[in-house]
Image (spheres, rainbow, N blue to C red):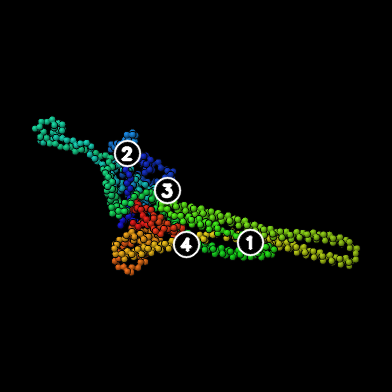
Amino acid sequence: MSKATNNIPRAAIHVGAPAKSFSAAEGYEPERRGWDEKTYRLKNQDTNNHYDFSRKHLNFEINGKGEIVPLGSNPIALHERLQKRLDELGFKPYMDKNNPLGISDNSPNCTVGIIVSGDHNVLTRLAFGDQDVDFTLQRSNTHVVLKQGIKDWALDTYHWACGRWGAENIIGFDVHLDETTPHIHIQTIPVAKTKARGRASVKYVHKDDKSKALSHKEWKKLPEEIRSNFVRTEVERREKECVSYAHVWGKDKYAVGRTYYQMHTDYYNEVGRKYGLERGDDIAMLPGEERRERIHKSKAVLEAERQAKDAIANAKAEKQRLEQQKGQLVDETQSIKKQKARMEDKVLQLEEYAAALDIKEENLIVPFLNTNPLVKKAVDDILEELGKPIPTFGHKEWKEERRQAIKTILTELQTALMEAKEAQKKDILTLGKSLYNKAMKDASAIIEQNKQLLKENHILSAENMGLKKRISSMDENAIHELRKQKDAEIERLQKECDKANAHAVRSNNLASKEHQRADDAELQIREMLAVPEIKELWNDIQQNKKAFWQQVDLWIANAKQAIYRFATDYQNAVFTKDYANPIGQGIIAEALKDGLDAPDKEQRKQATQNLLSQICWKGTTKYMSDLSETRTMQLCEEMTVPKNLMESLLLAAGGRGVVCAGGGGSDNKLTNWDGTKKRNGWGVN
């Protein structure tokens, strides 16, 4: 079993492809030459980059004297230092015959770039200690002070590189601390000592006098009898330094591989173990399939892993939010029922007041807000979006499209509900105004009647005065009797006038009260409409969750059945594909059911132990049951579970996704300890 899956801090060395040269711009980047805050912002527009301008002052380099100086201190640019060293070595690239200014494609490679890094936690602790450093680019890190540990690590790495390639052949040694993980850029020139070209020179030395040495031509001119006195010798060709990638790194891919292997071993022995950075596993010890599928890990993969991790965290938060919404919906439902009861009481009161004003019952019917068709249409559209199959590739884009589509559907539903609410509001206002107008109309009629009574009173008063003048000469008794009758009539008319005035006041008060009650009814209805009617959508989500957990139970049952079949199958000593696939699915399903994180090895082992504890070993031998448990735990440790698989399962657990019962189907790639990736389905190798 490979140690690559263990959480062990390791050193990382990446050797770039050999090159014939590089541009000035390529050389400016490792030295941050000419970089300002604007340059950092432009670089960070690529989501793979995480350059922190506030930590630029921490970068440093080691010059040819082995001194630590600020990054970019060398006045000579990196590409110029390359050319200067090549000129010293007498290196002449092959020129393209078709382009006198261009270098031929078959010209020898003359430079190699190397990046040395390691475990993030180890190196950041060496660089920053326990200081608060923000790696999200949200806060400034100008307060951070560089620790001595990272300088010691860089110096030890520099001495190791000098011993391997020569200090004069290291034209750049730049240490970057303004990115996510501290690392070193080493730019080298492959230089080896080789013998000069041409034939070895031949000399003839006299047997008795070693100072006499003749060339081949001079020896040929001597007489035959004298030639025998000279001995033929060959002068060995002289050695010289020259640029040679093949002599330094290897003449073929197998030799290059051996060089890489030895380089990792030497670095661990001389530097890595001193700082707690382990060497990686020998690739030859890995299974053939894993060895064939190893590829280098790019920044895009790193970003995808980070996004997958964030997506899982967001899914968990979303699940928790939905659970909270469920409780809120229950509380709001109870509140709506109470509001409904209060509204019914208000309607009864309105009916009583309406009866007093002679208002017909049909005039008091409040317009009904029917939102069921709108909600049903939104639910159907959402289910249609959720029913679209998940593609093999582009999970992120598929998820974003579904999220945007569902957001649009809910926005349209909200708009439709608001429009329906506004329409009902207008109807309610119209109803209230009609009731108010009717009450005011009745009050106006009473007021008009009162005015008529007042006019009649004035007329009667005028007639009374005339009568008084006419009977002034009549008999006193007759006058008294007539006055008594007139006073009684005036009193009667005054009582009728007071009664009319009181009735007018009561009508005005009643009209004002009815107007206020209409406003209160409108306010109550507005509060009731503030709660979204999504009960039907919630029921559909609950049905999806129930179906998913039934599928999870089926996976677990299949896994237990497969383990038991293996325990009773005496023909196999290891898991075949027929056993490994359902058992791997069952382990992931058990982890999901127990609330464990399957991509984490320790939590996955806990889920495996929970699965094994559910199996009844009746009918098997002690040896086969122990072997079955051992093979199951080995399978668990060898498994690698992709983060986005768990994201999809968690989405389905929340009732918002669909999971295929067949398992597998994922074409995602996982990353090994050394920055390489391997393909997987359910994560069972």
Q: Which sits earlier in the primary sequence, circle 1 or circle 3?
A: 3
Q: Nearer the viewer, mark 3 or mark 2?
A: 2
Check disc 4 and report its element: helix, strand or loop.
helix
Query: Dot 2: within a 10 Å radius of its alpha carbon, few (fewer than 14), some, or many (20 or more) residues?
Result: few
Disc number placed over residue 543 in the picture, else none: 4
Check disc 3 and report its element: helix, strand or loop.
loop
Q: Nearer the viewer, mark 4 or mark 3?
A: 4
Q: Amino acid at mark 1?
A: Ile
Which residue: 29% across, 37% down?
91
Query: Dot 1: within a 10 Å radius of its alpha carbon, few (fewer than 14), some, or many (20 or more) residues?
Result: few
Q: Which sits earlier in the primary sequence, circle 4 or circle 2?
A: 2
* Residue labelled with disc 2: 105
Disc number placed over residue 198 in the picture, else none: none
Q: Nearer the viewer, mark 4 or mark 2?
A: 4
- Residues 422 and 498: in front is 422
In this view, 161 is above or below 649: above
Q: Are marks 4 and 3 in contact (CB under 8 Å)?
A: no
In this view, 259 is above or below 524: above
Q: Amino acid at mark 2?
A: Asp
What's the distance in space between the residues labelled 1 and 4, CA to CA?
38 Å
* Residue labelled with disc 1: 365
Q: Amino acid at mark 4?
A: Gln
Which residue: 38% across, 43% down?
29
Q: Are marks 1 and 4 in contact (CB under 8 Å)?
A: no
Which quadrant, please, contains the N terminus? bottom left
* Residue labelled with disc 3: 47
Q: Nearer the viewer, mark 1 or mark 3?
A: 1
Q: Are marks 4 and 2 in contact (CB under 8 Å)?
A: no
What's the distance in space between the residues labelled 4 and 2, CA to CA?
64 Å
